[in-house]
Every structure is written in structure tokens, then in C-alpha cells.
Image (spheres, rainbow, N blue to C red):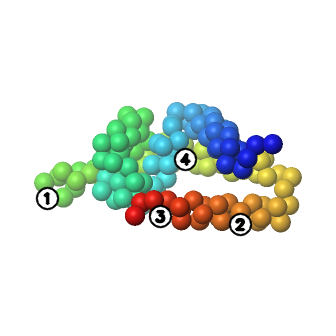
């Protein structure tokens, strides 16, 4: 039997692989899908997106250019000098996000189909506890 952290690492790889399969169906990466969700949620400028996603400006610019080339977002120049850009998700982008979200919900339901509510709740409790333990260790090493 694998130790817990090795099992989590393997589960994470499998989950990412399944999610990548879903996002590829609409010609997006996982990061692009998450960025579209952020814009839909009202984070429309590069400055705000950088803060909410934790991405550096160059990475964010590259991802925004990719989803703009895929016609998932449109940008509008604003401000006195027209240098600030506001991003809006296009109808194609919204439809793509909805399709991914629907497939992701179906995947989640399929994964937990035979789990009781008690088992699901216990897993959530244990994952939260593990997350807190890791964050506590990380915060000590950052000081």
C-alpha cells in the first residue's frame, strides 16, 4: 500500500489527466479554462487577474493572447491613454466554459457515485486537515 502523500500525488496526476481530456474537447488548456472563469467572475483587467491568479504579468499576457487568438475573449481599450485593457469573455468562451463545467460535474458525480455522504464528508475533513498541516509547515519555512 502506498503512503498517503504518494497516493495523493498519483491521484492528482490522474485528476489532471482527466481534466485535460475535458478541456481539450473545446481546444483549451486547464489554465486557459481557469482564466476564463476568472474573467467571467468579473476580474476583467490584467492587474486584477494577476492578483487573483497569482500569475506574473508575462505569463498572464501570454495566456490572454492565446485565448484571444482562440476567440474566447475580446479586449477593449480604456482609460485616458487607451493603454488599459478590459477583457470580456465571448459567446464562444462562455459556451466552452459551460461545456467544461458540465463535463467536470459529470466526472465528479461519476467518481463519487458510490460514496456515501458520510464518506464524502470525512474525505473533505481529512483533506482540509492535511491542507492546514502543509500550510503550517510552509509558513514556518517562509519566515
Residue in front for this viewpoint, 42 or 29? 29
Residue in front for this viewpoint, 34 or 130? 130
SS at circle 3: helix
> Mark 1 or mark 3: which comes first in sequence?
1
Q: Residue 66 location, x and y as percent? A: 39, 36
> Mark 2 or mark 4: which comes first in sequence?
4
Q: Read off the residue under disc 2.
A: 125
Q: Read off the residue under disc 4.
A: 97
In space, the residues marked 4 and 3 are separated at their CA atoms by: 38 Å
Residue in front for this viewpoint, 63 or 27? 63
Q: Residue 43 location, x and y as percent? A: 39, 59
**Can you tell which mark lies on residue 80?**
1
Give the foreground label among 2 and 4: 2
Location of residue 103 by image quarter: top right
Q: Residue at x 44, y 41 (%)?
A: 72
Q: Residue at x 86, y 61 (%)?
A: 116
Q: Is residue 83 left or right of residue 97?
A: left
Give the foreground label among 1 and 2: 2
Q: Dividing the image into 4 quarters, which one contains the N terminus?
A: top right
CB within 8 Å, label 1 to label 3: no
Q: Is residue 106 left or right of residue 119?
A: left
Q: Read off the residue under disc 3.
A: 140
In space, the residues marked 3 and 2 are separated at their CA atoms by: 23 Å
In space, the residues marked 2 and 4 are separated at their CA atoms by: 29 Å
Classed neighbour count for the residue bearing mark 2: other residues with Cα under 10 Å, few (<14), some (14–19), many (≥20):
few
Q: Dividing the image into 4 quarters, which one contains the C terminus?
A: bottom left
Amino acid at each position: 500500500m502506498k503512503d498517503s502523500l504518494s497516493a495523493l500525488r498519483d491521484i492528482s496526476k490522474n485528476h489532471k489527466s482527466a481534466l485535460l481530456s475535458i478541456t481539450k474537447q473545446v481546444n483549451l488548456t486547464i489554465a486557459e479554462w481557469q482564466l476564463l472563469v476568472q474573467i467571467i467572475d468579473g476580474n476583467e483587467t490584467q492587474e486584477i487577474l494577476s492578483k487573483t491568479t497569482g500569475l506574473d504579468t508575462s505569463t498572464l499576457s501570454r495566456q490572454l493572447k492565446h485565448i484571444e487568438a482562440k476567440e474566447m475573449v475580446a479586449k477593449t481599450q480604456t482609460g485616458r491613454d487607451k493603454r488599459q485593457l478590459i477583457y470580456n469573455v465571448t459567446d464562444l468562451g462562455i459556451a466552452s466554459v459551460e461545456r467544461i463545467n458540465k463535463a467536470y460535474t459529470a466526472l465528479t458525480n461519476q467518481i463519487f457515485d458510490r460514496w456515501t455522504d458520510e464518506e464524502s464528508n470525512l474525505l473533505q475533513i481529512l483533506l482540509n486537515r492535511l491542507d492546514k498541516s502543509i500550510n503550517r509547515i510552509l509558513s514556518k519555512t517562509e519566515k
